[in-house]
Amino acid sequence: MQAGSAVALAGLGLPAVAALKEPPGTSKLLKVGVTSGPHEQTFEVVKRVAERDYGLKIQIVPFTDYSRPNAALDAGDLDANSFQHRPFLAAQVRSRSYKIVGFGRTWIGPIAIYSKKFKSIAELPEGARVAIPNDPANESRTLLLLQKAGHIKLRTGIDPIAGINATPRDVIENPRKLRFVEIEAAQLPRTLDDTDASAVNADYAIKAGLNPAKDGILVEDKDGPYACLIAVREQDQAQPWVQQLVKAYQTEEVRDFIVKTFGGGVIPAF
């Protein structure tokens, strides 16, 4: 494009194509579902980068739970979503036959166990009530965390990527007789007054004023399969805008926002 044409477009209030890194992968308005909290906050920055660098038009659609974003994506009400890790997506695809695939890595939100009654996991008494997420992927994630820390032992063969998730029925050693209470993930911060401890995903923890790095009595490390991703429908996976969306996310601008805003509550995974 000639420089004069770019100036003319700018004068009409339109983005100058010469300023874009690539031509837009689509002219449609992309609806991207996120869970409220860190995913929504981060995607506001991604939206700005995607519009500036690739000319993509994005509408962010917030959700308050984990069950609806994939249903909405599969139904075509969304073009993409950004809220889940690969084991959760794999479990949803297997159980509900969604035609959804994941791309890229966004951030890892370490799941942690919190308590208002005890300052360390070692202080939990025998028979303590521990609230855990009731969705298969995050329930297994919590039990694997407890196993890694030596507080329980699970049967062999648990593999979250393959969809072989752990449940309390798979606990074969539980020397402290911990009692697990399965709760919908979004409600877990509210259980802290009623339980001895509760496992809370990072995005819900941060919304509740909790920081895993500072407040957790047992915190997941950054290794493992639990980096979040961007998901799209199978029919869209080859569309140019998908990779543009991933590239817009995986920028230093977005990385810096995550690090500065969440202070270790969530960690960039790219």
Image: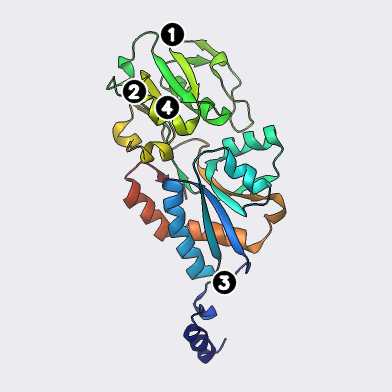
Judge the density around disc 3: few (<14), some (14-19), many (≥20) Cα neighbours within 10 Å.
Answer: few
Q: Which of marks 1 and 2 is in front?
A: 2
Q: Which residue is drawn at 54% across and 70% down?
A: 55
* Residue 193, label in figure: 2
Judge the density around disc 2: few (<14), some (14-19), many (≥20) Cα neighbours within 10 Å.
Answer: few
* Residue 22, label in figure: 3
* Residue 199, label in figure: 4
Residue 215 spot, x, y in % from top left: 30, 32
User: What type is the residue that disc 1 sits on?
Assistant: Lys
Work out whether 82 lies above or below 134. Answer: below
Of labels 3 and 1, earlier in sequence is: 3
User: What type is the residue that disc 2 sits on?
Assistant: Asp
State the separation of the CA atoms marked 2 and 3.
51 Å
Q: Farthest residue to the bottom: give it.
A: 4
Total marks shown come to 4
Judge the density around disc 4: few (<14), some (14-19), many (≥20) Cα neighbours within 10 Å.
Answer: many
Marks 4 and 3 in Cβ contact (< 8 Å): no
User: What type is the residue that disc 4 sits on?
Assistant: Ala
Marks 2 and 4 in Cβ contact (< 8 Å): no
State the separation of the CA atoms marked 1 and 2.
20 Å
Q: Which residue is drawn at 69% across and 58% down?
A: 238
Marks 1 and 2 in Cβ contact (< 8 Å): no
Q: Mark 1 points at which residue?
A: 177
User: What type is the residue that disc 3 sits on?
Assistant: Glu
Q: Farthest residue to the left: give it.
A: 119
In terms of image quadrants, where is residue 85?
A: top right
Marks 3 and 1 in Cβ contact (< 8 Å): no
The secondary element bearing badge 4 is classed as strand
Residue 112 spot, x, y in % from top left: 39, 30
